[in-house]
Image: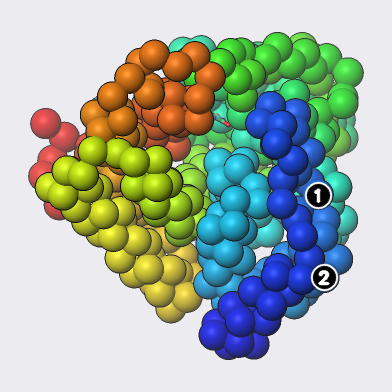
Amino acid sequence: MNVTDFRRRLRDWLDTHDLSPAADHSLDAQVAQLARVRRALWEADWMRYGWPAEVGGLGGGAVLRAVLGEEVARRGLAEPGIWSLVEVLVPTLIDYAPPALAADLVPRLLGGEEQWCQGFSEPGSGSDLASLSTRAVRDGEHWVVSGQKVWTSLAQYAARCVLLARTGGPGHAGLSAFLLDMDTPGITVRPLRTLHGVDEFAEVFLDGVRVPGDRLLGAPGDGWRLAMDLLPHERSTCFWHRIAHLHNRLDRLLADGCEPDADALGTVWLDLHTARCRSARTQRSLAADGRLGPETSVDKILLATAEQRLYDTARDLLPGTVELSDTGAWRTEYLYSRAATVYGGTAEIQRNIVARRLLDLGKE
Ligand SMILES: Cc1cc2nc3c(=O)[nH]c(=O)nc-3n(C[C@H](O)[C@H](O)[C@H](O)COP(=O)(O)OP(=O)(O)OC[C@H]3O[C@@H](n4cnc5c(N)ncnc54)[C@H](O)[C@@H]3O)c2cc1C
C-alpha cells in the first residue's frame, strides 16, 4: 500500500473506531492505554504494516510505521514517549535475535500483549556505556547474569528486557546482548521517581539470573555492534511522531491564550519544522539504505532543542503556568522536556559524535 492510501484508510478507520484515552493521566493508565491502542491497531492490521512477515507483519516500508505513529500522536491516543519503544527496540531485535525467538516474541510487543524495556545504563556507565560492569558468565546451556541497571524506562511493566552485559574483557569487544525475561528469579525492579513526579524508570538488580543460551542476541561479543545499531533508532525514527505531538502542543499553547509574541512563537515553529524536515530526510535514507548511523545525532540535537524551546516559550508566554501549578500538563511536560538532552545519549555526547564521526574533527 502506498503512503497516501495508507494514511487515508487509516484516518477513515480511526474516525470510526474511538480509541480516545480516559481522563486518567497516571502512568498506569498511560501504559494500559498504550496496550489497548496497540491491540486494536494490531487486530485491525495497522500495526503490522512496515514490519516483515517473519514477525507477523504485512511488509511495506518503515515510513508506514512513521505515518501510524504520527496519526496516533496527532489524535493524542497514546503517550508519545512510551509509544516510541517499539521503534527503538524491534528493528535491531529482528536483526540479531534467532529467527524463531523474534517470530515468537515480537508480535506480543507489537500487538500490545507485552511491554519491554532496554537495560543499557548502569550507575557508573551512561555516556561511557562501554565501561558497563554487569557480567554474564556461561554455565552449560545458560548464561548467569549479575549486576545492576538504572534509568530502565518502564521496567516495572516489562515482560522482557534487551540487556547489555559483559561476557569478555574490558571495553567494547567484551560486551554481549540478551533478551531477558523479567520474571526470571534473581531480578528485582525498584521504580525511581522522575523530576516530573512519575515513576517512569527503575533500578534493576540482577542477582545470579539464569538466561537460556538461545536468548543471546547475535554472537558473544556482538553487544556493542547491537547497541550502535539500536541507538540510532532511539535518536531518530521515533521522533517523527514526537514532532507531531509537539506541533499539537504548540497549537494548544495558542489555544490557551498565550501572549502573542510572534518572534518567540515563530522561532518555536521554525525549530519544530527544522526537526521535522530532518526527520523526513532520515525516513528517506532509512528507506533507501535500510540502515541508520551516527548522522542520527543531528536528529537528536534538533529534537531536543525544539522540544526545550517549545516548553521554555510556554513558560514565558503563559506566566506562572509552569512555576505556580503543581500538577498541570504544562508544568509536567516542561519538567519532562529537560530529559530530552539526556535520554538516548546526552546533548554533549551527540555533539561529540557530530564532531568526531561526522566532521572528523578529532578527539579534542
Ligand atoms: C527519561 C530518561 C529515560 C531513560 N531511559 C533509559 C532506558 O530505558 N534504558 C537505559 O539503559 N537508559 C535510560 N536512560 C539513561 C540515559 O541513557 C543516560 O542518562 C544517559 O546516557 C547519560 O548517562 P548518565 O545519566 O550516566 O550521565 P553521565 O554519563 O554520568 O553524564 C553526566 C554529564 O557529563 C557529561 N559527559 C559525560 N561524558 C562526557 C564527554 N565525554 N564529553 C562531554 N560531556 C560528557 C554528560 O553530557 C552529562 O551532562 C534514560 C534517561 C532518561 C533521562
Which quadrant holds the C terminus? top left
Which corner quadrant of the figure contains ligand 1?
A: top left
Is the residue marked 1 within 8 Å of ligand 1, measured from its CB? no
> What residue is drawn where x is 45% and y is 52%?
248
Mark 1 surroundings within 10 Å by alpha-carbon count, few (fewer than 14), some (14 through 19), many (20 or more): some
Residue 8 seen in the current view:
yes
- Read off the residue under disc 2: 44
Q: Mark number for residue 236?
A: none
Towards the viewer: 261 or 118:
261
Depicted 306 relative to depicted 72: above or below:
above
Q: Label 1, secondary structure: give it.
A: helix
Percent x, y for residue 350? 29, 39
**Which amino acid, mark 2?**
Ala
Percent x, y for residue 298? 28, 51
- Read off the residue under disc 1: 36
Is tag 2's residue or tag 1's residue first in the polypeptide sequence? 1
